[in-house]
């Protein structure tokens, strides 16, 4: 096994990793829609999906089938090349952006060491920004190609939005770069490791590189710009339902619409991952390394959760629920028990914390969607240019001044 | 001047057809927007997509039958529509309504005002992108509809107010029902205000949007919260009291900014005032007393009398077969609907069916101001302006 890996690993391992990542991310996308509907429903005193499967757990599956089976009408007079290319471009760029994100520290399996992610590029932050900035082309092309006035306005808004937030987005991370002195996302995370657990993350800044200078300004700027980047509430101007019907994807249906949809959720995951890496220590545990018991936290969470799911499932109204839910609970319990074993336990630490943090950020996204009204697009531009940009620049100046002062 | 027929745009402008199927035109309003970029150059509302011919249909019904038609006009304010029609017929007949029934009418109409404003607030917030407020508002509206269901047997098309009084005796335990709602509601209004009134984004979307000076609003015959937000304290409940409104102690909230935010604040304040009125009405209503006036041949007799008195049975039969004939003449009665002055004009030729029934629908009249409001503003502001005019298309087209 290890011989084969040593010889052909450079070929086999990335293929396996890509397959796993695409599968995991697409599943996550599907269940993110379920989570979003469920969370918003509970915030709004509703139940959310609960018909398809127990607690609506099979809803994403039903949605997927619906998207595949639906008729795919094409409006007359479309610019065919742009119209067909746009959804592919959106989905492709969103998935590609995940390639450079490290989900955990390097791992060694069967004597073969590899990075926890697909590509380990030493300029990964730049690559990521380059790819996500291209994402606006998908929307602009869709708006242009659809031969619909609402789509056109959505596409135009998106372009205007891109110009306004992209600068602030890039400038807000410069502080982190100054501290890390590196453009590799992996190194940025590693620089945030320290003796104080979560206090060493860039958001607090008590690490060796940060030296006690907090990046909270950059963090807030980045988050606001990131919401604009992913076209989410309160900056979902390109699709603003109450104004532009559905904005850039008004004329899309069936799988082409699903591609936009998956693309949006994938870029949400990508941007949340980036946010976690830059400001919240990526895969690092929030507890100091000197607390070994915290390594068992995944198990400590998973086993009771599994037990609860089992007992809740046994009382469920439908027979399907009484089968599926306890099964799901049993999987959780087994998983939790498995994580007690030391090699697996070590392996899972990084990804566990990484996904926990990304999950928290995604939850915040959903929470905002349920609470806030939408900006007007001239207000977003004003906000980007007159507030975010100066504040980000101020953060860069302050951070560099601090670093200069410390070096003296 | 762009009209519906000539709306094609120029080399610099584009015409966007907004509606009749559009998420935020509140029904089937169609607005043609001539756009320069996203700036509105002209806006032309196009009506008639929900024309139901209610006014014409009234001419073929007896006076009592027409009440059910009025329910379907402004479907967020059916009790108010019932009230204005019944007041007009009562004025034609010179009929006095017992005090107890009048207070009940006031209570129901004010509850209706709250429920109408709740729908307005919810849909308007949804237009602005604040999803949750809409569901919270509909949750409370549901409580009001439950009250209506207990009173009238119907949630929306109540037809509860009848000529000469009310349709039914109030249900047992109605006081607890209404009181529970009154105790709950102020905190819920605070909740909406917490989500919106201090929200910077909400301010940004509404302040200075859709401004029109008071003179223009008066020239455009605007009434209701839209006019009161411009500082004119005109309210038919104070100006021409009907149904014993002069006995109630309430304020007419006004603002001076005359923009969408001022209209929002006025409506929220009106909800609180309405709750005050409902509370007072509950105090005034006695447990015993008539809910219909004694008018043989016009108001249906009590069931009890029908079983025992020959006269009552004959009247009952005559009312429901050929109706009653008011004296020839014309009347106009205005009331304050949640949207403004709702007026009812009835012309009688002495037959059991009205010669002409006309309603002054505040939605229809207020909509006149829309093209002026949105001129030079953005598409997003157009949506805000349509929202704060608070149109109900059933009433616009009648």
Image (cartoon, rainbow, N blue to C red):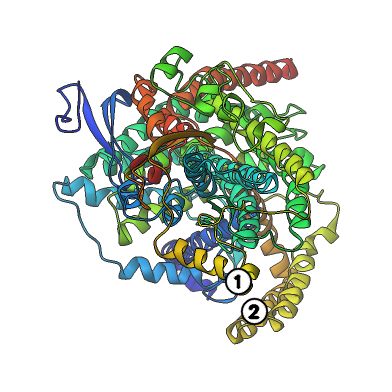
Residue B147 placement (x, y as % from top left):
66, 57
Q: Is residue A99 among what the camera can see?
A: no
Residue A391 relative to residue B74: left or right: right
Q: What residue is rendered at 81% in x and 43% in y?
A: A195
Mark 2 vs 1, N-terminal side: 1
Count of picture labels:
2
When the figure is inspected, residue A207 is found, relative to residue A313, above or below; the finding is above
> Disc 1 designates what residue?
A55
Residue B32 relative to residue B128: left or right: left
B88 and A176: which one is in front? B88
Residue A109 placement (x, y as % from top left):
59, 67
Q: What residue is rendered at 43% in x and 35% in y?
A: B331
Q: Chain of mark 1?
A: A
Residue A252 placement (x, y as % from top left):
29, 53
Q: Chain of mark 2?
A: A
A95 and B38: which one is in front? B38
- Mark 2 vs mark 1: give the one in front: 1
Picture quarter containing residue A339?
bottom right
User: Answer yes or no: do the residues labelled 2 and 1 have beta carbons within 8 Å?
Assistant: yes
Residue A4 relative to residue A255: left or right: right
Provide the secondary structure element on which disc 2 rests: helix
Residue B271 placement (x, y as % from top left):
65, 37
Circle 2 packing at 10 Å, graded few (<14), some (14-19), many (20+), is many
Circle 1 packing at 10 Å, graded few (<14), some (14-19), many (20+), is some
A176 and A368: which one is in front? A368
Q: Is residue B243 among what the camera can see?
A: yes
Residue B15 relative to residue A369: left or right: left
When the figure is inspected, residue B219 is found, relative to residue B313, above or below; the finding is above
Picture quarter containing residue A258?
bottom left
> Disc 2 designates what residue?
A325
When the figure is inspected, residue A367 is found, relative to residue A307, above or below; the finding is above
């Amino acid at each position: 096994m290890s011989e084969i890996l040593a010889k052909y690993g450079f070929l086999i391992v990335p293929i396996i990793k890509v397959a796993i990542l695409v599968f995991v991310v697409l599943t996550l996308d599907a269940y993110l829609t379920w989570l979003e509907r469920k969370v918003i429903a509970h915030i709004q005193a509703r139940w959310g999906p609960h018909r398809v499967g127990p607690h609506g757990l099979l809803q994403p599956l039903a949605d997927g089938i619906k998207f595949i089976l639906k008729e795919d009408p094409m409006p007359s007079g479309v610019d065919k090349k742009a119209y067909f290319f746009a959804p592919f471009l959106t989905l492709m760029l969103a998935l590609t952006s995940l390639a450079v994100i490290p989900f955990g520290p390097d791992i060694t399996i069967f004597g073969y060491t590899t990075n926890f992610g697909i590509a380990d590029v030493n300029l990964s932050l730049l690559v990521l920004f380059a790819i996500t900035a291209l994402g606006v082309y998908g929307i602009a092309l869709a708006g242009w190609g659809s031969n619909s006035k609402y789509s056109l306005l959505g596409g135009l808004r998106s372009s205007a939005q891109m110009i306004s937030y992209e600068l602030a987005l890039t400038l807000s991370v410069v502080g982190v770069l100054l501290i890390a002195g590196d453009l590799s996302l992996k190194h940025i995370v590693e620089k945030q490791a320290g003796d104080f657990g979560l206090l060493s993350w860039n958001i607090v800044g008590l690490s060796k590189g940060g030296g006690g200078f907090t990046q909270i300004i950059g963090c807030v700027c980045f988050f606001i710009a990131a919401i604009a980047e992913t076209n989410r509430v309160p900056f979902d101007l390109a699709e603003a339902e109450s104004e532009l019907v559905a904005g850039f994807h008004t004329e899309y249906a069936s799988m082409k619409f699903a591609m936009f949809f998956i693309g949006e959720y994938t870029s949400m995951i990508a941007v949340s991952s980036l946010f976690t890496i830059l400001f919240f220590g990526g895969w690092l545990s929030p507890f100091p390394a000197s607390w070994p018991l915290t390594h068992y936290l995944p198990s400590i969470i998973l086993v009771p959760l599994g037990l609860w799911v089992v007992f809740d499932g046994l009382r469920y109204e439908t027979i399907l629920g009484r089968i599926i839910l306890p099964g799901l609970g049993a999987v959780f319990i087994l998983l939790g028990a498995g994580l007690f074993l030391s090699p697996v336990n070590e392996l899972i630490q990084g990804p566990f914390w990484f996904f926990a943090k990304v999950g928290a950020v995604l939850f915040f996204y959903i929470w905002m969607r349920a609470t806030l009204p939408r900006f007007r697009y001239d207000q977003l531009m004003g906000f980007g240019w007159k507030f975010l940009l100066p504040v980000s620049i101020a953060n860069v100046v302050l951070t560099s001044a601090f670093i200069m002062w410390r070096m003296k | 001047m762009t009209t519906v027929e000539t709306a094609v745009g120029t080399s610099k402008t584009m015409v966007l057809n907004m509606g009749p199927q559009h998420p935020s035109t509140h029904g089937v309003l169609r607005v043609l927007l001539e756009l320069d970029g996203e700036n509105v150059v002209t806006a032309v509302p196009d009506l008639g997509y929900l024309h139901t011919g209610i006014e014409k249909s009234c001419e073929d019904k007896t006076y009592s039958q027409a009440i059910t038609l009025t329910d379907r006009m402004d479907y967020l304010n059916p009790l108010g529509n019932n009230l204005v029609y019944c007041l007009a017929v009562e004025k034609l007949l010179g009929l006095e309504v017992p005090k107890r029934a009048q207070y009940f009418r006031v209570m129901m109409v004010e509850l209706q005002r709250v429920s109408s404003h709740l729908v307005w607030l919810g849909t308007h917030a949804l237009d602005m992108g604040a999803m949750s407020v809409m569901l919270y508002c509909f949750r409370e509206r549901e409580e009001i509809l439950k009250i209506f269901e207990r009173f009238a047997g119907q949630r929306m098309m109540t037809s509860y107010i009848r000529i000469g009084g009310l349709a039914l005796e109030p249900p047992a335990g109605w006081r607890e029902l209404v009181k529970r709602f009154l105790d709950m509601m102020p905190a819920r209004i605070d909740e909406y205000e917490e989500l919106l009134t201090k929200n910077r984004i909400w301010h940004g979307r509404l302040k200075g949007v859709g401004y029109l000076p008071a003179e223009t609003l008066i020239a455009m015959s605007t009434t209701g919260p839209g006019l009161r937000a411009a500082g004119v304290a005109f309210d038919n409940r104070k100006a021409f009291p009907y149904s014993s409104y002069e006995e109630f102690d309430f304020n007419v909230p006004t603002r001076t900014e005359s923009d969408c935010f001022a209209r929002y604040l006025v409506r929220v304040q009106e909800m609180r005032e309405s709750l005050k009125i409902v509370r007072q009405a509950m105090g005034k209503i006695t447990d015993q007393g008539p809910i219909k006036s004694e008018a043989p041949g016009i108001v249906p007799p009590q069931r009890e009398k029908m079983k025992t008195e020959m006269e009552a049975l004959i009247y009952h039969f005559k009312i429901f077969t050929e109706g009653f004939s008011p004296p020839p003449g014309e009347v106009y009665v205005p009331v304050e609907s949640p949207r403004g002055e709702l007026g009812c004009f009835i012309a009688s030729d002495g037959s059991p069916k009205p010669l002409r029934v006309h309603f002054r629908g505040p939605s229809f009249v207020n909509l006149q101001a829309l093209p002026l409001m949105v001129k030079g503003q953005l598409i997003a502001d157009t949506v805000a302006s349509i929202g704060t005019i608070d149109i109900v298309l059933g009433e616009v087209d009648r």
